[in-house]
Structures are given as structure tokens and as C-alpha cells.
Amino acid sequence: MKKNTKKSNIYKSAAQVTVFSTFEKALSFIYRIILSRSIGAEGLGIYQICLSVFSVFLTAASSGLPVTVSRLIAKNTATGNPKGKHTVVSAGVLCTLMFTVPAALVMFLAKDLYAFLFPDRDCVKIFLWLLPGLILTSVYAIMRGSFWGNKQFLPYSIIELAENAVMVACGCALIGFAHTAKGGARMAVIAVLISYIFSFTASLGWYFLKGGRFVSPKTQLKPLMKASLPITAMRTSTSLLNSCVAMFLPALLSKACGYTSSEALALYGTVIGMSVPMLMIPNSLIGSIAVVVAPEMSENFYAKRTELLKRDIERTIKSSVLIATVLIPVMFTLGTDIGVLFYASELSGSVMRRFAFMMLPMCLSMITTTILNSLNFEMRTLIYFFIGAIAMIATILGFTGLMGINAYMVGLTLSFVITAALNLKLLKKNCPEINYAGYLIKSSLICAAACMFGHLFSNLFQNIMAPVWRLILCGGAVSVFAVAAFCGMEMLSARPFKKLFQR
């Protein structure tokens, strides 16, 4: 009975986080449409560059800490040391403040040293609005890790959604006062800062309300830093890579393909700001699953519950494959319509359609990295990331002249394929009893069949139905086809959904 209750709680928590995350991402999607139409591709490109540079420092400050805080809290739970939880959180806050406070001060005083990262000095002034948020949101990240480790998924989900809602509401109100692309980007950045203030205040309030407190962090500082550094290095490198791409890709497009500076920046904003976020939609759903399952896997790992750990790994991988397999045919069939309808950009839609298949290796890469980090393989996942990143950079530098902006998408896809393959190999080596290969092969066949069905079905309504109705009808039909195929091949069970409503 206890085991069944635990499973039911996991299903409910995963569903809870997924529902809130879906609303959050839908809100972000709508907001990005508003931004693209209000401040244009150029303004969106400036906004994206500012966030990319900021994310490097934010990632360096706190990206590895929330995951490690969550894992160490789970470890203290498994070993029967509840008092250690407060020590872990206190150590996390101290670590992030030791970096963010000096970093924010130095970046404000020495802004001329990194001005070359931006197209012009006005963009630097826009970026400076984000600096206070570096301190605030890094502390919130530690609180987020404590929510995960203590399995407090409802307050985490509410604060995440509310933070996004505050950003959207403030952004929509502020961009109305802007009259230029740069002015719009500035207002959008100010809205981000306001949302950081909100999440910082709300998370600390909840932490103290539920009995949390700050204590001496001495005993947990060393293990926390040792475990978090590889994750931080990997995620910082990801942000740094994105920032480097933001800097050199527009210039490379101008030099290799003959675009003007404005055209190259607009092209970058279209693909990176419109197409890529749509293709990253599965990550939001998978991230919700990982938030719930990762602490559970860490607890089972430290408590040596081998059978439960194997079960969680298999189900998590299969869930990620299922999500990708259902969404790929939808994007392949309707990517062009989505780009035109939501962004008024046929280019963004065509990129979504051509690279829809990227979502499967992307999902596998993300979830297997999370699993391996939960099992204390942070250093290996860091090495695998660098291998994929090198392949991506080489592709961009070598093929932009031939493929234009598509070279970035090819390189991104290749990096996901490499990291997913290496992660799965390592996972199989250390957990030889896990079984996912058959499920992956069958899912790929279902995906191919659903893409073919979607292509033929959508062609029937190409010239006789408005895009919005074609999107609803064809999107629903393709999704139902894929899900029905999974059920028909007995690869999808309704039992987890029934458990959501069990008391």
C-alpha cells in the first residue's frame, strides 16, 4: 500500500508541475508573439542578446546549485538527517551571494570592458537593468532547489507561473511607452527585472513560513561546491556558447552570405527568438518530469533501492521519448502555418518544420543528463557536453557560407545527437538492466508514420480552410493518430492518469 501511495504521489506531482509549466510556457509563447509584433525582429534580437549575455553570469552564479541542493536534501532525507536540510540551503545561499554581489558590482563599474559583446553602447545600457536581478534570482534559484528536494512542488509551480505572469503583465504595459526597437527591448528587460524581484520575495517568504531558517553552512559548503561545479561549468558553458553565437553569428552571416548588419540581426532574432523556442517546447514538459523524478532517483540511489531506481530511469526515458514522438509530427506538419500565424514569419515556420526531428535527440539529451547528474556523474556529463559543443561550433564555422542560418540548426541538432548517444551509453554501462531500445525504435516508427499521415491530411485542407482552423484540426488529428498508435502497440497505459484522481 505504501509503495502504491508513493507512485500515486509521484504521478500527481508530475502532473501538477506539468500543468503549471504548460500554462507558464503558453504565457511565454503568447508574450513572445506580442514582443515580435510590438518591437520587431530587431528589437527581439537585442532583447535576446541581452538575455543571452546575462544568462552566462546567472548560470555561473547558480545553475548547478539548485540541482545539487535538491540532491543533498534528498540524501539527508534518505540517511535520516532532517537538520542537514537547513545547512544545505544556507550553504547554497552563501555560495551564490559570494559570486553574484561582487560580479554585479564589477560589471556595473567596468561596463566598458565588455561593451564589445553588444552591437552598440545603447544595448549595454539596456543590459545594466538586469544586474540587480543577478543577485535576486540566484537566491531564488537556491529556494527553488529546496522546494525540489523537499518535494514541495505546488509552491514551486505557483511561484514560477506567477513570476512569468508578472513579467508578461509588466512587459505588455511598458512596451506601449516605447517608440523604437531599442526602447522596446529596454522596457522588456525592465519587466524581467520586476519579475525577479517578485520571485525572490515570494520564495523567501514561503521558505520561512514553512519553518526554514539559515544556520551555519560550514559542514555542507565543501560537498555542495564539489558536486555543483561540474553542473555549473556545463550550464555556464551552454550560456557562454549561446552568447558567443549571439555575437559572431550575425557577423558571420554578413560576411559569408552578404547580409547587411540589420538583416543579419533580424535573421538571428527570427530563428533564435521565434523558431528555436518553439522547438524547445518538449523541454518544458520534460523539465517538469525531471523536477519531480530527480529527487526521487537521488533518494533511491543513496538508499540503494536498485529496483525502484531502475524503474524510475526507464519510465523517465520512455516518457521523454513519448513527448517528443507526439510533438514532432505536429511541428513537421504545421510548422510553416505556426510561423505565419503567430509570428507573421514564413521563415521561422519553415525552420520549425525542417528541424522538427531535432526534438527527439534534444529530449533524450536533456533527460539523460538529469538522470546521470542524479546518480553522481556530473563530471562525465560535462565532458560529453563539451564534445557536442565542439561539433556545433565546427558546423557553424564550416557551413554557414553554404547553408546560411541553417548551419546553426544543423550544429545544434548534431550536438544533441552526440550528447544523447554518449549519455545513453554511460547509463547502460552503469545500469545494464534498464531497457529502452525497443521502445525507442517503435516510437521512431510511430513518429515517421504520424508525419506521413499529417502531411497527407494537411494537404487536403491546404487551400480550403483558414490557417487557424487547419492548425486546430490537423494538429489534433496528428496528435490523436500518434497517441492511438502508442495505445495500439501497448506502449502507453491509462493507469497513471487514473491514479491522478485516486485519493
Image (tube, rainbow, N blue to C red):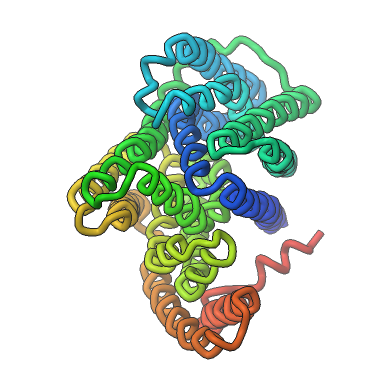
Note whether residue 385 is visible.
no
**In the rendered view, does 363 fall on the left or right side of 172?**
left
Q: Nearer the viewer, residue 55 or 342?
A: 342
- Picture coordinates of residue 105 (x, y %)? 51, 10
Looking at the image, residue 281 lies above or below residue 222: below
* Residue lying furthest left: 398
- Picture coordinates of residue 129 (x, y %)? 58, 23
- Give the residue drawn at x 46%, y 15%: 107
**Quarter occupied by the N terminus:** bottom right
- Picture coordinates of residue 242 (x, y %)? 38, 39
**In the rendered view, does 96 fall on the left or right side of 227?**
right
Q: Quadrant of residue 142?
A: top right
Q: Nearer the viewer, residue 4 or 360?
A: 360
- Give the residue drawn at x 63%, y 30%: 190
Q: Nearer the viewer, residue 152 or 157?
A: 157
Q: Quadrant of residue 4?
A: bottom right
- Give the residue drawn at x 53%, y 21%: 128
Looking at the image, residue 190 lies above or below residue 266: above
Looking at the image, residue 194 lies above or below residue 454: above
